[in-house]
Image: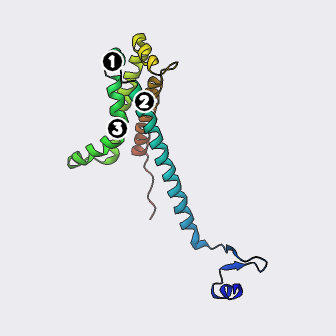
Amino acid sequence: MLKQDNEKDPLLIVDPNFNHIQSRRFEWKDVPHVILECAACALCLLCLLWLSLLIIVSLLLSKANTVAVRTACAGFWDFMLISTLSPLIIPTLYCMLSCCAWSWQAFSGGSMLIMGIACLHLTITCSENSTCMDAIRATTPPLPWLIYMGWLKASLYLAGALSTLVAWYHPIPKHP
């Protein structure tokens, strides 16, 4: 029976000692499929990473949603909430304003630059305010995790803006 299956499909290697198919022969036409599957796995991993970071930031924001934090750190909690939703807000704004002839690269780079500078300013201001630091530290003792998240977001926004600026001045050449 196995011998007949092997004769029908020459790509299958059948081991006569076992009652199952061991493997297939390598063919170069399979390489794009393997690359596509690897890219899909990487994309899935990035989505899961983004989702886990969204959950962590949401938990931090829910713990820091106190009267003490909102009064001592004027605008910081609100900005962190908006920046958490920025992966949804920025493309929506672009869709609404795309009639203004901006390219996506310019719009997203400008948005990241504005968000990075604002996040850096608010995080520095809150880090220098001892009342704000004590209020945030009280929500997640012993460390002020929301301030750390502010530093992380500022660095990510500014890295995205720098990446856009580099791509703007040194575009990847298109091959024919």
Which label is found at residue 121? Answer: none
Q: Residues within 10 Å of mark 1 (few under 14, many from 20)?
A: few
Q: Which residue is mark 3?
A: 85
Asked if disc 1 and disc 3 are in contact, CB closer than 8 Å, the reply is no
Circle 2 SS class: helix
Q: Residues within 10 Å of mark 2 (few under 14, many from 20)?
A: many
State the quadrant of the N terminus: bottom right
Circle 1 SS class: helix
Task: Identify the amino acid type marked 3.
Answer: Leu
Q: Which residue is mark 2?
A: 154
Look at the picture and state if 111 lies above or below 40. above
Q: Earlier in the sequence, mark 1 or mark 3?
A: 1
Residue 43 location, x and y as percent?
48, 52
Q: Which residue occupies the foreground of this view, 112 or 75? A: 75
Q: Residue furthest right?
A: 17
Which label is found at residue 67? Answer: 1
Kindly report the distance in space between the C-alpha atoms of the residues bearing marks 1 and 3: 22 Å
Look at the picture and state if 22 lies above or below 114. below
Q: Residue at x 79, y 78 (%)?
A: 17
Q: Which residue occupies the foreground of this view, 42 or 81? A: 81
Q: Earlier in the sequence, mark 2 or mark 3?
A: 3
**Residue 139 seen in render:** yes
Q: Residue at x 54, y 67 (%)?
A: 33
